[in-house]
Image: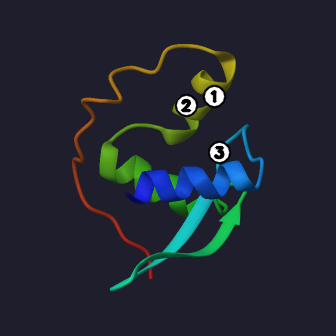
Amino acid sequence: MIRAYVCQILDLLQFDWGAAHTELLMTEHGPYLVEVNPRLVGAQIPHLLAYAFDRSIYADLIDLHLGLPLTALRELKPRWFSVSR
């Protein structure tokens, strides 16, 4: 449900290239859009993702934009948990 909601928002914005930071507010009535940024908000978000997944998110984005295959993302399991506040 969340993925479909975010994809619908990105489609409505005609955002079809690059990485995006999408922030949602989860409520009892479902998700609500807070913001969409066409970037990964400085280094904080990619750093937290890299820590949690034990891999470079920047390297994955570079490979994605170069059209190179990404290694086993479907089987990717979190190593740790990371949050920002």
**Nearer to me, 23 or 13:** 13
- The residue type indicated by label 1 comes to Ile
Q: Disc 1 vs disc 2: Cβ atoms closer than 8 Å?
A: yes
**Nearer to me, 49 or 10:** 10
Q: Which label was assigned to residue 62?
A: 1
Q: Which label was assigned to residue 19?
A: 3
Closer to viewer: mark 3 or mark 2: 3
Left or right, 26 with respect to 68, comes to: left
Residue 33 lies, with reference to residue 50, above or below; the image says below
Residue 66 lies, with reference to residue 19, above or below; the image says above
For the point 70% across and 40% down, the residue is 18
For the point 35% across and 29% down, the residue is 73
Q: Position of residue 38 (x, y in %)?
A: 73, 54
**Nearer to me, 83 or 36:** 36
Q: CA distance from mark 3 to mark 1?
A: 10 Å
Quick one: SS at disc 2? helix
At label 1, counting other C-alpha atoms closer than 10 Å, the crowd grade (few under 14, some 14-19, many 20 or more) is: few
| Residue at image mark 2 | 59
Q: CA distance from mark 3 to mark 2?
A: 12 Å
For the point 24% across and 30% down, the residue is 75
